[in-house]
Image (cartoon, rainbow, N blue to C red):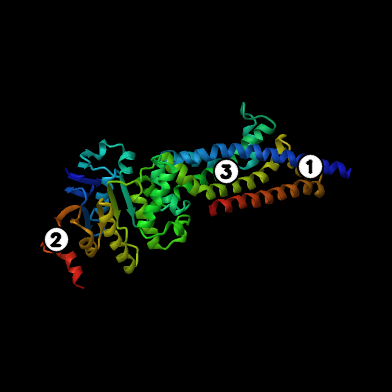
Amino acid sequence: MRSDLWSEILQLTAEHLLLVLNAMVLAIAIGVPLGIYLSRKQAARPWLLGFANIMQTIPSLALFGFLIPIPFIGGIGKRTVIVALVLYALLPILRNTLVGILGVEAAICDSAVAMGMTDGQLLRQVQIPLAAPTIMAGIRVATVTTIGTATIAAAIGGGGLGVFIFRGIASVDTGQILAGAVPAAVMALAADWGLGWVERKLSRA
Amino acid sequence: MALVEFHGVSYEIAGKPILLDVSLEIEAGETLVLLGRSGSGKTTALKMINGMLFPTRGQVLVDGRATTDWDPIQLRRRIGYVIQEVGLFPHFTVGDNVGLIPKLEGWSAADIENRVNLLLEKVGMPPSEFRSRYPRQLSGGQRQRVGVARALAADPPVLLFDEPFGALDPVMRLELQQQFLSLRHDFQKTSIFVTHDVREALLLGTNIALLSGGRLDVSAPPQEFRQAQSEEARAFLACLNN
């Protein structure tokens, strides 16, 4: 029985990690380019930031519920979970990318332009490297929250450590709840520490 | 032919005039000082030369061609730019900062290295000591020297200076002013220099253009400028007596 529990913890932790990784790769792949785009297109800012903001305010359980009837991205299972997690992770990544780029000192950008850098050169050689720690901070925050939010995935058949938590709640079994909550917390702490280390590395460069 | 010309240049933002009908000619090798109070339009005039701003009326010509007809990148690569905040890239070493434009222009690594070493030597920052430092490891005066070296890097015919020494202590300022004069002697560049310091204007300028409320008030060589009778010119000259 004990060894069964351990192997289930291992299996669900791996499943959880995979959900988070999938969601984060997608959220970064969408959020960072979108943030860069917004740094160039002021007019689009309120719309896209507003959208990302609204996504964050929807309670996570409700968002899963909303997604279920939507074709292609919805339904029961992992795909819906990943879509919801991406929508949640988008705001911190998008916002930090934008704030990081706009936060580069005006004198530095001015002199880059005055020296005859093209917009692409300004972006690649100056703004992105200088914004990198801020962008990384957004990714770190998004990852830590995603690890927590992903426990709700079990509610719509997405698996992960939430399976323990929902089962524990249903059977009033604290042991089961802890079997889900402790690995999730450890994962979140590890992500926070690891990505924080990358962030510090980037800001020293 | 003048290297830089202003023909009846006006500039306004949202109906508020910043420059009014300014005409100027800057000959090759000359140092024109744009003198004026804060808000007199001198920085605006400067930014029109390298196409950071364009006139709402009139024309600015560089090498006989209107700035609106230049490819802005090509234009700016021919014009060095030094500002008060220096604007060095904090994530680049001193050497990489100075070598930036040559690199963008596709120079070979060896040529870039030679050029960077020569210029750091010229501005009194021995390359062996300073090349691989980062801007944050330098004093304000040292940073400004690197800024000047960077502006000279690709050997541009024209240099723009926007109150470059304004934030430095008086001793450092004098040192850098002397260096400006010696660099002018060595490199024979055409410079346009913005300042609100009449002493600096008289020391560095071969010609002084006094701007007042967006209009060109006086344009004269330093000796003549000392005798100028306009109200604004006398207000500036009065600063010399205290």
The one nearer the camera, B144 or B233, is B144
Write down the residue under mark 3.
A56
Amino acid type at mark 3 = Gln
Give the image location of residue B101, x and y in percent.
38, 45
Q: Quadrant of the N terminus of chain B?
A: top left
Amino acid type at mark 1 = Leu
Give the image location of residue B140, x and y in percent.
39, 62
Which mark identifies residue B159? none
Category of crowding for the residue at label 1, using alpha-carbon neighbours closer than 10 angstroms: few (below 14), some (14–19), many (at least 20): some
The one nearer the camera, B240 or A28, is B240
Q: Say which element carries label 1.
A: helix
* Image quadrant in which you'd find residue B67: top left
Q: Output the chain of dot 1.
A: A
Q: Output the chain of dot 2.
A: B
Q: Output the chain of dot 3.
A: A
The residue lying furthest to the bottom in this view is: B242
The one nearer the camera, A132 or A115, is A115
Q: Is residue B86 above or below residue B242?
A: above
